[in-house]
Image: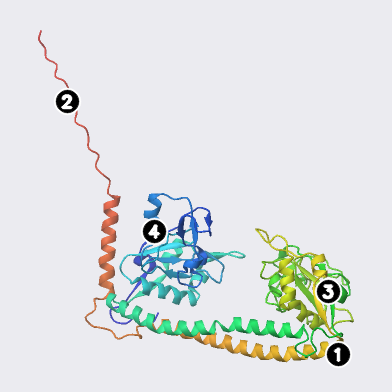
Amino acid sequence: MSELPKGWSIATFDDVIYSITNGLNGKQNKDGNGIPVSRIESIASQVVDMSRIGYLNEYDDETLEKYRLQQGDVLFSHINSPAHIGKTAICEDGIALYHGVNLLRIVLNGTIEPQLFNYYCKFIRARGDFSSNAQHAVNQSSLNQKKIKLFEIVLPAKQEQTRIANKLDSILAKVDKAQARLNKIPAILKRFRQSVLAAATSGELTQSGFTSSEWQSVKLIDLVENKPRNGKSPKGVDFDTGVKNLTLSAITPGYFVENKYKFVDLDVPTDSHLWLKNQDILIQRANSIEYVGVSALYEGEDDQYIYPDLIMKCRANARVLSKYLYYALSSEPVRKYFRDNATGTTGNMPKINQTVVSAAPINLPQIDEQKIIVNKVGRLFKKADKLEQQYLDAKARLDRLTQSILAKAFRGELVPQDPNDEPAEQLLERILKERLSQQQKADKPKKIAKKRTTKAKITDKG
């Protein structure tokens, strides 16, 4: 680390933390019964989101006192997906909430302003420090308390901390407003694409109208060479077998994504239906209700991948263009049909079977009109893709701007220094002495008062 500004010091998280504790165990509900408790989802956006809390029915007076969150407490996501590990949020004044399971509660000891500590956590999380020190499993990462306490932190003078935190509040509020405006763009683009598909599959895009005698209402089974078939999902291995088995994430966005696969130790004959061919259509037969039925068109080389059990594959016949069929399957009426006919929507993963997929309703024009539609949709989607890329570029610039501002703050370049501020080292030394003194008092064995006994005197009267 470069030379610190005058009056600053380096400490560890352990030096500035008074306590770090786990939350309340117990089965939570979302129906509002019981006390409100924090959940992992409550700080997904790195602020305390009261619309994403849970409730706990079983509690007592001791629980209310021990787990009530206070202003300045920092919630830390220590068990989460790799992308979200280390997220934090600070409890503001007026929050009526209790500390729930799977989030750590950090209470600071006065050496650093809670708001500034929270900003520092965001800064080093974006830098990758939390993730690089976490333990990573397949879908979950964890960061234990011991490792958290070892992280270094820069400490400005206490008065300067307040000035820095206030300045960051002011600047980053403007960045957040810009981010909020940007965040509306994906939804707008999604609506635009769905509007294009709705027009394309109803005749409006070519102004023929669905009532035209040249359009037909058919089922998917009428437009494919063979019935849709499930794939296969053997266990993945950690070595190159030459057989790449796609994962669901390869088509979850609604288009094919390269290199989303696992190697499997499986002998797949060259004539197996499992091998993907150019122009094959893939349909998710099981996923969350939002994604069940999502489709993608494979336009890569033949025999590069096999597909998994949770995906169905079909291939367009001579009556329909592959891309038109893909557009029809991606349109909202067909997506809604899949959602409405999915089974296991409560508790289990929603699924659609071969019968449901085969009966998917398709509005079918003649081949010549299909060609016109595919070309028009392609041009409109290219414009949407260009706008989406501009959005992603702008979002990346904003993310870099936020990190740049935080870096400047923790180099001491954001606000002027005051020579009258008490150096952080003195404050830190004083608080650590107080903590040591308290620990010594707590560790000191208590004297056990001995009961005095009086022996009876024996008088010899003889």
Q: What percent of the width, then of the height, locates residue 5? A: 32, 82
Above or below residue 41? Residue 304 is below
Label 2, label 3: how many angstroms apart (C-alpha)?
Answer: 101 Å
Question: Which amino acid type is marked by label 4?
Answer: Arg
Q: Which quarter shows the C terminus?
A: top left
317, 11: nearer the viewer: 317
Residue at image mark 2: 454
**Looking at the image, is mark 1 or mark 4 earlier in the sequence?**
4
Label 4, label 3: how many angstroms apart (C-alpha)?
Answer: 56 Å
Badge 3: how crowded within 10 Å, few (<14), some, or many (20+)?
many
Label 4, label 2: how many angstroms apart (C-alpha)?
Answer: 52 Å
**Tag 1–tag 4 contact (CB < 8 Å):** no
Q: What's the residue at 85%, 82% (across, down)?
A: 320
**Looking at the image, is mark 2 or mark 3 earlier in the sequence?**
3
Q: What's the residue at 70%, 60% (across, down)?
A: 344
Judged left or right of residue 462, residue 50 is right
Badge 4: how crowded within 10 Å, few (<14), some, or many (20+)?
some
Between label 4 and label 2, give the one nearer the viewer. Answer: 4
Label 1, label 2: how many angstroms apart (C-alpha)?
Answer: 116 Å
Residue at image mark 1: 368
The picture quadrant where one finds residue 23 is bottom left
Q: Which quarter shows the N terminus?
A: bottom left
Question: Which amino acid type is marked by label 2?
Answer: Thr
Residue at image mark 4: 68
